Image (spheres, grey):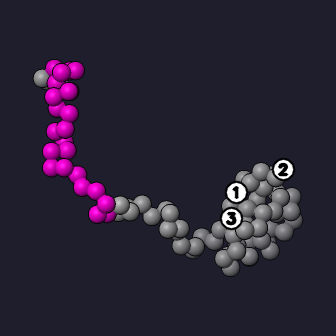
């Protein structure tokens, strides 16, 4: 991925945006430190961003999950907790 300094990005913004729109994202840096990443809006989300169901079938939740630790809670806070 191309990294351009902020001054160069200002001078060549149209060209850089056209490239990003065609699927070539770039990073704008200031004093060598990356600040922003420019990507096309319609670019599909990365596989890492997908979170729902990513561990499906890898563990199970016990039926008494909502009652686990009841004894300890009663000890700490009384029966009305």
Q: In percent of the image, x 15 and y 45: which residue is there?
A: 64
Q: Is residue 67 left or right of residue 43?
A: left
Are the residues tagged 1 and 3 within 8 Å (C-beta)? yes
Q: In percent of the image, x 35 and y 61: which residue is there?
A: 55
Q: CA distance from mark 1 to mark 3?
A: 6 Å
Task: Quickly name the residue at label 3.
Answer: 38
Residue closer to the observer: 58 or 16:
58
10 Å crowding of disc 3: few (<14), some (14-19), many (20+): some
Say which label, 2 or 1, has the lower sequence index.
2
Q: CA distance from mark 2 to mark 1?
A: 13 Å
Q: Is residue 17 left or right of residue 80?
A: right
Q: Is residue 77 above or below residue 15?
A: above
10 Å crowding of disc 2: few (<14), some (14-19), many (20+): few
Q: List x then y, in percent, for residue 57.
A: 29, 63
Q: In percent of the image, x 69 and y 70: which residue is there?
A: 25
Task: Quickly name the residue at label 2.
Answer: 31
Task: Quickly name the residue at label 1.
Answer: 36
Asked if the magenta segment contains residue 75, the reply would be: yes
């Amino acid at each position: 991925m191309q990294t351009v300094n902020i001054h160069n990005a200002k001078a060549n913004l149209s060209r850089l945006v056209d490239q990003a729109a065609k699927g070539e994202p770039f990073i704008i840096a200031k004093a060598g430190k990356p600040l922003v990443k420019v990507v096309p809006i319609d670019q599909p989300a990365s596989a890492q961003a997908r979170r729902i169901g990513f561990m499906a079938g890898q563990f199970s939740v016990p039926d008494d999950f909502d009652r686990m630790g009841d004894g300890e809670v009663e000890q700490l806070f009384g029966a009305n907790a």
